[in-house]
Amino acid sequence: MSVNMNIPKVDGIGLVTGKPAYTNDLASKDSLIVKVLRSPYAYAKIRNINTLAASKVNGVELILTHKNVPDKVYTRAGQSAPEPSPYDKKILDEYVRYIGDEVAVVAGINEEAVDKAINKIKVDYEVFEPVIDYEKAIGNNVKVHDPDCGTVRFDIGRDASKNIAASYHMEIGDVEEEFKKSDYYYEDVYYTQAQAHLAMEPHTAYAYLDLQDRLNIVTSTQTPFHVRRIIGQTLDMPLSKIRVFKPRIGGGYGGKQFIHGEFFVSLVTLRTKKPCKLVYSRKDVFSASNTRHPMRIKLRIGAMKSGMINSLEMKILSNTGAYGEHSLTVLMVAGSKTLPLYNKVDAVKFSGDVVYTNTTPAGAYRGYGAIQGNFALESAIDEMAKLVNMDPIEFRRINMMKEGETSKIFEVMGEGTEGTAQIIKSCKLEECIDEVKRKINWNELYPRKEIDENTVRSVGLAIAMQGSGIPYVDMGSAILKLNDDGFFNLLVGATDLGTGSDTVLAQIAAEVLEIDTSKIIVYSSDTDLTPYDVGAYASSTTYVSGNSVYLTAKKMVEIMKDRAKTILETEEVQYSKGVFKSKDKEITLADFSNEMYYGEDMKQLVASESYYGVKSPPPYMACACEVEINKNTGKLKVLRCVASVDCGVTLNPNLARIQVEGALVQGLGMTLFEHADRSEKGTLYNNTFLTYGAPTKMEIGKLDVSFVESYEPSGPFGSKSVGEIGIDTPPAVISNAIKNALGVRMKELPITPEKIWEAINNK
Amino acid sequence: MIPIVLNVNDVNYEIMVNPGEMLLDTLRKIGFTSVKKSCDTGACGICSVLVDGKVIPSCSYFTMKIQNKKVITIDGVEEKAREIGQFLLDEGVDQCGFCTPGLIMSIIAMENELNEFTEKNIKHYLVGNICRCSGYEGQIRAIKNYLEVS
């Protein structure tokens, strides 16, 4: 009735016609303007900061420096407590650790006053030599953090004296022993870069005091409940004094699973008692928000003559930049959401260190490590297929995960903690591969087709997996309220980032309640008015929040049926499609609801349930691209990108398809163009749209996304997640296609024409 | 501050502006929050409005240059915006929605400016409207459906 249908997004028409929806649109007109003075140095100590002249500028109301804010460490990562990220950040610090780090905050009545004041702040810096190259961070004389400062909630392998923010190690079996038995062996090192999220809405936060003197924060966040906890905990405020509300947000992709301006607007409003807002400039978004973790990934793989992989090892060095948000978990996901794909190995090892450098902090970013790990693993799989002389698709087929199987890795590796064992109940990877192989015309195009002397076309393929929420960590909940006239309010803590989760959650409720989706009015992401949810991350909303809505709606049906017994004067009531029936009587949902409000035995009917995962069923996909390469220039064109995805039952096929299409282009952007690159001094080269190089409509050829339906028994109506998986495959797909075309292996992202040209000419 | 008369959606606004003020900031200041701020450099298309029928990035256009010209924001073409918007909704491609008002203004300008609509010239005309959610493919499907081209 509602599920598996292309219901348009419930908020769509308001958004496309430009109605006030986002934080900056909702901020009151009399808000003080808040701006941040940022460090021009990659690493320095503030010897002295003089704000006297600045504070005398007309219209300036407050200036914050490290001298007048709470001196306390915390983590900006929007994660459940206890966070697996180190507490290594202060609201404002006397040390600045990257170009863009916060030095002072100015609030004033308009932009002109604030800009003028910022220019008048005099800072005396003691400038230090920075650590920019992350491969030189461990054991460097320069320590990004004082080893005596910073804390952890539990052991994450942090050792600030070595510039290590987190580290991890696990081994199942004995990989060295197994490599000795391997008939074929391959190892190589792959590099991935810092990628900017590029959410079109810059980070924005707005705060005001309500009539009860409570701090209200309206913010473009993916995790309103975590924001409330982190702000309260760090400012020593009872959480009852804080309300956080996420209105519509202009894209997140992980970048808003992070505290940005929330502390500054909170402090300004608490001290001035006035509303205020902080809107990041685009330059600040690039240089002073966060990026994807750059990684160096060493991949070792051994296989037998039979073509079976017997041993696998992934060893990572990851760069978290100046602060350690998401450092351990992104590292672990690079292994835990890739290595189980090849579950027939006799031994598998994963280890890595995440290092501090004086660069823009890294954080959560769609894929969350899996795209980095996938690039190395799926490139190495193609290399090994060549060594054992098998078609790369057939090689994958005999080695990969299948329905009904498991991987020991699920049990060993979680996100920051131990994992959770699971048997895979839904996996249509083989069908995904078949479909992609057919659609890309693999048999005709593999490995390459010479078009003319200078032009070659080829295909490359890769497979991927992700997860659906974090078991025993992520919790979602929902409340359903029945109104007169027979419609419901659905209150969810879940955070719609534009993905359409409000709509999908309404569809789940409508399906259970057997009514039209338009009868479900969704309100989400408000810490005062909606029940708890971890927020939108870890591919959890459809699966975790969706299950909570499913359970809530089931409960509502039972509550209503129980009441209907009295009204229909019977012991046995059936409910179907908005009508309650006994043997001889019936009442419609609308009449029943009116009876609840205005009848004899009045009652407000409310149902609520919550859900946490006890496993994390992976969605799977196969992806292939056809590329055309000019051998003279190294220019590569993606002609077609074909993807087939198993995300269980697609609850809203249109929205699921756009999730995958959007993720593919973000992934292709990372593969081919995007790089938040910096100088040896730590200056970001490309901090505008003009210089960064995100894909436009012109760069990518035809996308062709389809779904192979499986049924995940633990998901609401058989569904699994779909938000992240689409981003994982492009780097390996393109690298494999280039190898098939030219015989050279590209091991460093982004794969630019210059690098391809160099590889051709240095072959 | 300099007094000017700004004509937005056929209504005259008598306002004071700074000489260096950008049209985007002026429009938001007088209540047109439908015009969103994103890249600050005229490179993403999000703040697109029509000035005398031509689409321009309002973040990079001095308000002072607008005297005696007519500005149209998406609020001034509500009906048309709903019509085009519905095609985007039907593909599920509205997503976060932040770039969509600007895209719709560009589509309206494109309809006025181009004589022929092929996938190639649609993409070429709309190349300056960046979207990070959709991957563009669904936008092109929706726009082709709206323009009734195959």
Image (cartoon, rainbow, N blue to C red):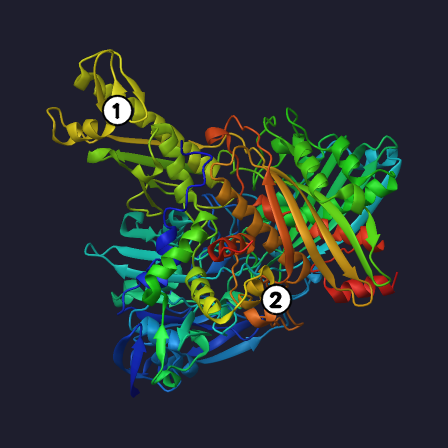
Q: Quadrant of the N terminus of chain A?
A: top left
Seen as rendered, the residue at the extreme front is B115
Q: Which badge, 2 or 1, comes first in the chain's sequence?
A: 1
Tally of marks: 2
Residue A693, which numbered label? 2
* Rendered location of residue B138, percent (x, y): 53, 52
Q: Which mark is residue A560?
A: 1
User: Please, is residue A442 above or below residue B40 in the view?
Assistant: above
In the picture, measured across the screen, residue A100 lies left or right of residue A19, that is right
**Residue at image x 61%, y 26%?**
A423
Q: Nearer the viewer, residue A417 or A152?
A: A417
As drawn, A472 above or below A120: above
- The subunit letter for the residue under badge 1 reads A
Residue A221: x and y in percent read 42, 54
Within 10 angstroms of label 2, few (less than 14), some, or many (20 or more) residues?
some
| Chain label for disc 2 | A
